[in-house]
Image (tube, grey):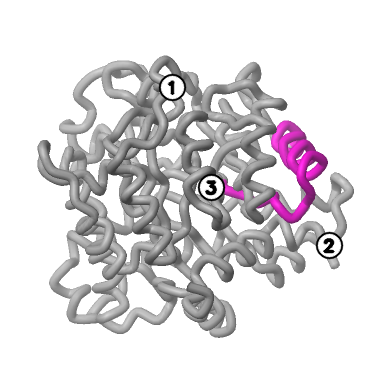
Amino acid sequence: MDAVELHKTAIVADTHQEILDAYVYEFLLQEDAAVRGEVHVFDRVYKPVLEGQGVNLVQLAVGGDHVAQVMYSASELRFWDAHKKLDVLNSELEAGCESFILCRDASDIDRALQAGKFAILATIAGGRVLHGKPNLNLRASLRSLYRMGLRGLQLTGNGRNRLADGVAQTRTRGKLTGFGEQVVTEAERLGMMIDTAQLSDPGFFDLIALTNRPVIDSHSAAAAVCDHPRNISDRRIRAIAERGGVVGISFWAALVNQDKAHPDIGDLLRHVDHIADLVGIAHVALGPDFYAYQTPMNREVVRGFANRGPDFCTFDRKTPTQSEKYPGWIEGIWYGRRSSDFIAGIEQHEAFPGITAALLAHGYSEAECRLILGENFLRVCRQLLDTRSG
């Protein structure tokens, strides 16, 4: 079977993708017609992108710690932002859109795959979404978003929140906070997928001691191959594998090879090989971390682009979030100032099928490719989201 046919027939999962901002933006522009079902914005804006990517199972981040400097949602109200994006997905479904299923359990995933629909798992990329009043933390925010369809929980971004410290906070050696422990325990009770991406090492191992269920890292790479602050050690990779989880390998250039201006698929395959050799092929997945935010067309500008309007910003899907004041930095971690933040050859969704050809050419068998492309992640999803196992 050639690579094109394999990619078409395989379960292809993206373990971490930010919701397409162009989709949310267009929905809000056409909200009245969309909620009446007169137009399905998902079909017009998002469906062609996912079809080009060739995926059928997507873990979609609907909010998180780092909100991009976009024109309509840049806000410290992170709960509001996640609530809004979940409402967009639910409103489209309620209005009759049949292209996707917002999956709440394992049976929904199977139903979507069997029907040829996109299986979407909603997640958050950082616990600031769950913050309550400045002097009060409640698990009510988690339960409320769960009722709307949230099924994934990444505890932190690079920085610090009220749950734990991210990878940029190396000096504190902070574990989970008391609130973080409560949130993890509640997420486990609800049957949610816990994602350790961007969590500090002390926080990670504290989490591992707290729960005995599988965990994932949705979008990192191997520190042994590229010693970037966002990448994870062999010890962490082994701990994830021992729980039966997976590591979704990021396609961000800085994480794949920080010493090259334009890392390529060959550099990415070194991470695949390393994790497969270390813990086995069953624990390798793909989390390219594609972004689609309104970002400045000229990244040399250091201030104020968020408020300059559409003539200054674009959905280019190559240059994701960055600091307004310090381009190339995200919450204390340096990613570099690049023309594209992704590896050469797979810089956005539509180029993603190239990974299948690369895996085959590199010597992975068809069966191994199917595991990496999606079956490994699907296995974990079924285990964690199977309501019969709770």
Instruction: Tell me which label, 2 or 1, sits earlier in the chain.
Output: 1
Q: Disc 2 on helix, strand or loop?
A: helix
Marks 2, 3: nearer the viewer: 3
Calculate the distance from the C-alpha at mark 1 to the C-alpha at mark 3: 22 Å
Indicate the position of residue 183 as horizontal and vertical percent values: 33, 51
Q: Is residue 214 above or below residue 5?
A: above
- Residue at 77% across, 36% down: 274
**Left or right: where does residue 314 sit relative to residue 208?**
left
- Residue at 74% across, 40% down: 275
- Say whether residue 328 is visible: no
Q: Disc 1 on helix, strand or loop?
A: loop
- Whether residue 388 is in magenta: the answer is no
- Identified by mark 3, the residue type is Ser
Asked if the residues shown at circle 1 and circle 3 are in contact, with their CB atoms under 8 angstroms apart, the answer is: no
Query: Which residue in the structure is indicated by mark 1?
Result: 173
Query: Which residue in the structure is indicated by mark 3?
Result: 218
- Residue at 23% across, 28% down: 305
Q: Main secondary structure of the magenta part?
A: helix
Indicate the position of residue 322 as horizontal and vertical percent values: 36, 28
- Which numbered marker is on residue 366? 2
